[in-house]
Amino acid sequence: MSAAYANGQRVADVPIDEAGGWARRPGHLVWIGLYEPSAELLGDIQAQFGLHPLAIEDARAAHQRPKLERYGDCLFVVARTAQRVDGRITLGETHLFVGRGFVVTVRHGASVSYAPVREKTEACPDLLAHGEDYILHAVLDFIVDNYGPVMETVLSEVEAIEDCILKRELRPDEVERLYLLRRDLLRLRTAVVPLVEVCRKLEHGDMVAIDEEMQPLFRDVSDHLLRVQDEIDAMREVLAFAFEASVMLGQAQQTVITRRLAAWAAILAVPTAIAGIYGMNFEVMPELKWRYGYFIVLAGIFTACAVLYWRFRKNGWL
């Protein structure tokens, strides 16, 4: 989508091949939104706005780290988007070219449309009159806000796993899920942390002059990102503790089973040992010819086993 604005008002939907001419008109701003554009379309955009070849190459290839770069009078910003796809956190990218009279957004991968951002900015003409700075803030704020639903779904899943750990030992598929969640959160963290530095540079105008009225807005985005980062770190710790607790509970259960087996083995060793002794092929053995010897031996075996069972039961092994 490509639209032209003047004094915070949308004045026309313009073809992309005419966007450069509209952007050079005094007091006009062109906002172009693209999703995985072709090399030819990016080349056309580059020719109209004089974008740097390295920035165009990054926008075409994607798989970039969040960053802020300046090429002449043009600002190039890379931000990572996040969505839940089939139960996994999937990352996408948004590349923004910001220059005098134009803003170009290029989306790759998992990313929702920025149509709601347009509607929100067009509903606030006073803010949109600030031009490129406000659009840049609106897009970054929208990206950061979309981290929230992703974090909420992960949090609910983490809490469910915590409840299971307290009740029973985790199944192998649940342990695998723990690992995948923790890895996804790590990937999300690598997308969030560099974006904090990008917003701080925009807040302080380190690389480009940002309207003073817009700088607090970028500070607000930075605060949201820091809160998301804290939530990610907290959930990763919870998942780590959950994994450790699962391992410890499994070891404790194995210890209980081992103790029970050892206790029964000790009890069964008594009749086994006595039967082994009297099973020897010797003619002269104590009480071998005694009339009540068999019953006395059985009574002794039963008594010894009962005493052992009582002691193991008392010590919690049975």
Image (cartoon, grey):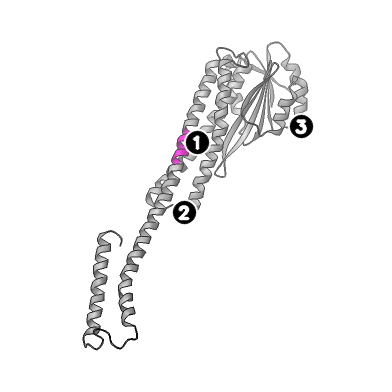
Give percent across and percent down for residue 201.
Answer: 58, 19
Q: Amino acid at mark 2?
A: Arg
Q: Amino acid at mark 1?
A: Met
Marks 3 and 2: which is nearer the front?
A: 2
Q: Residue furthest top?
A: 26
Q: Which numbered marker is on residue 68?
A: none
Quarter of the image containing the C terminus? Answer: bottom left
Tell me if residue 243 comes above or below residue 110 in the rendering: below
Residue at image coords 60%, 31%: 80
Viewer-proximal residue among 279 and 51: 279
Viewer-proximal residue among 104 and 26: 104
Indicate the secondary structure of the residue bearing disc 1: helix
The residues colored magenta run: 231-238
Give percent across and percent down for residue 24.
Answer: 73, 14
Whichever of callouts 2 and 1 sits on the residue coming sooner in the sequence is: 1
Whichever of callouts 1 and 3 sits on the residue coming sooner in the sequence is: 3
Q: Which residue is mark 1?
A: 151
Q: Amino acid at mark 3?
A: Ala
**Cα gap from disc 3 to disc 2, whole angstroms:** 48 Å
Residues at marks 1 and 3 touching, judged by CB atoms closer than 8 Å: no
Q: Quadrant of residue 4?
A: top right
Q: Which residue is mark 3?
A: 39
Indicate the secondary structure of the residue bearing disc 2: loop
Give percent across and percent down for residue 286.
Answer: 25, 83
Q: Which residue is mark 2?
A: 171
